[in-house]
Image (tube, helix red, strand yellow):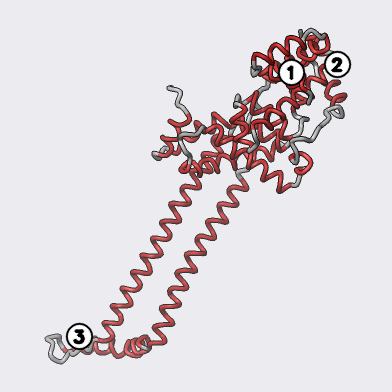
Amino acid sequence: MNMIDELLNKYIDGELQSDELEEVQQLLKNEDNVKRLKALRVVDNSLRMLEDDLAPADFTSKIMKTLSRNSTNVKLSKNYFASAINVIFAVSILATFVFIFSQVKLDYSSSGIDSKLNDTVNSIIKSTLPLLTFFKNKSVMFFGSSLSLILLLGAYYLIEGHKIFKKRIESFTSK
Amino acid sequence: MKHLTDIEIIESIQRGNQSDFSLLVDRYKDKAFSMLRRMLKNEMDAEEALQDCFLKAFNGLKDFRKDSQYSTWFYKITYNTALTILASKKRKLEQEMSSIDEEFDLGAYDPEIYATTENVNHFIIKMVDKLPVRCSLVVILFYLDGLTMNDISKVMGLSLVNVKVLLHRSRNSLRDLLLKHNYQEEVL
């Protein structure tokens, strides 16, 4: 870009220093430079009339829907996590009670329960005894706990995966 | 309704009024769309990018520094989003974005556009779309969005001198076309 063009552009933008202004005045004694300045003014005026391209009419509502959907998903994901923690906590409490119950030896001979009830209780205990003995086995307990944990985590990630998939489908269809 | 400043709207959003973000969307969607359409040269890509820009802006509001201007910050997001899309599409990016010193010639588009336009304004506006991406963007940010050259240099990550070079070069090339068609005599 030559010096004349630069000065004329600065003139258009009102950026000339006083010494440069004198230089421009000298330049404008030449008819060609006057033409160039005129044309530059036309360009400047036309560019000032540029208008915005309009974004699609429903754009604002679309973006606000996406934002509210995203924030709902965040809340839901927090809820799922809290639920998973609660379930793990409840299962561990239940397991503790089962363990304690299996350690306690019941003696019904000294109680005041009548013999019929005593027989019923004894038969229930006898029938569940193999099951309790089975669950008292340490390796079974370890296996059971691990399986529960894996199932809970699996369910959690399954739900999360489903949510992400659903979100993708929704964003795809909303376009 | 009272006209809220960008900062007042942002403070309201940060207090939890998420719906107030729609005020910022309404205020900037057309300007950002104009910018994106000219950079990406495709309305569908521009719309998709526009959505992306506003989501990025919303998520970034918590880190927004209130001593800076929202418009400059948002246009920077818009510019970078468009650059990422262009890079991923490899759409002549190197040719169009590589050098400030690169000269360009609008002559190839001139006959077609001159033949289909009715007046000088229409001719100039059509020609702006044919400028190289960075030149067109400087023109849009300066004339349409009313950004100062300093702000444009922040948005585009260029020096102030380079922004001026791009603006002057764009105007000069448009002026040369007007001189060629003697348009300046018709108007003035």
The percent coordinates of residue A12 (x first, y second) are 69, 16
Residue placed most toward the observer, B169 or A18: A18
Task: Identify the image quadrant of the N terminus of chain B.
Answer: top left
Rendered residue at 52%/56% (across/down): A163
Chain under label 1? A
Give the x, y percent position of residue A175.
Answer: 63, 43
The residue nearer to you, when weighing B3 against A106, is B3
Q: How many angstroms separate mark 1 from mark 3 (CA)?
A: 105 Å
Determine the secondary structure under disc 3. helix
Residue located beneath label 1 in the image: A43
Nearest to the eye among marks 1 and 3: give it: 1
Going 83% across and 21% down the picture, which residue do you hit? B177
Residue at the disc numbered 3: A117
Is B49 located above or below residue A49 in the figure?
below
The number of numbered badges drawn on the structure is: 3
A160 horizontally vs B85: left or right: left
User: Amino acid under label 1?
Assistant: Val
Residue B39 in sight in this render: yes
Q: What is the C-alpha distance between the residues marked 1 and 2?
A: 13 Å
Which circle marks residue B181 in the picture? 2
Q: Are marks 2 and 3 on the same chain?
A: no
Tags 1 and 2 in contact by the CB under 8 Å rule?
no
Seen from the viewer's position, the closer of residues B83 and B48 is B83
**Could one spot residue A56 in this view of the protein?**
no
* Residue at screen point 54% across, 29% down: B27
Please name the amino acid that badge 3 sits on. Answer: Leu
Q: Position of residue B102 (x, y in %)?
A: 79, 35
- The percent position of residue A57, horizontal first and vertical second, equals 60, 31
Q: Is residue A130 left or right of residue A107?
A: right
SS at circle 1: helix
Is B19 above or below relative to A134? Answer: above
